[in-house]
């Protein structure tokens, strides 16, 4: 488990919550 996976998940999560663009 690295930080990249976490960052990716966070990115998708944020995008799902507040889709901007």
Image: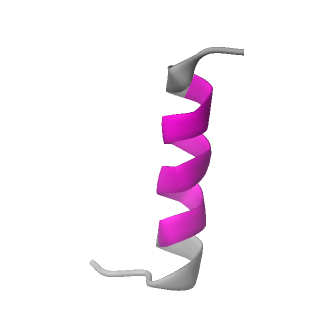
Left of 14 or right of it: where is 1? right
Q: Residue furthest left?
A: 21
Establish if 7 lies above or below 11.
Answer: above
Residue at left offset 60%, top offset 64%: 13
The image quadrant that residue 16 belongs to is bottom right
Return the residue nearer the eye: 21 or 14: 14
Q: Residue furthest right?
A: 1
In the image, residue 4 lies at what x, y percent?
Answer: 51, 23
Left of 15 or right of it: where is 20? left
Quadrant where the C terminus is found in the figure:
bottom left
In the image, residue 17 lies at what x, y percent?
Answer: 56, 82
Q: Residue furthest top?
A: 2
Residue at left offset 61%, top offset 15%: 2
Residue at left offset 49%, top offset 38%: 7
* Span colored in magenta: 5-14
Per the image, is 11 magenta? yes
In the image, residue 10 lies at what x, y percent?
Answer: 54, 52
The image quadrant that residue 12 belongs to is bottom right
Numbered-mark total = 0
Quadrant where the N terminus is found in the figure:
top right
Left of 7 or right of it: where is 6? right
**Majority secondary structure of the magenta segment?**
helix
């Amino acid at each position: 488990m690295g930080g990249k996976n976490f960052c990716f998940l966070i990115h998708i999560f944020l995008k799902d919550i507040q889709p901007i663009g």
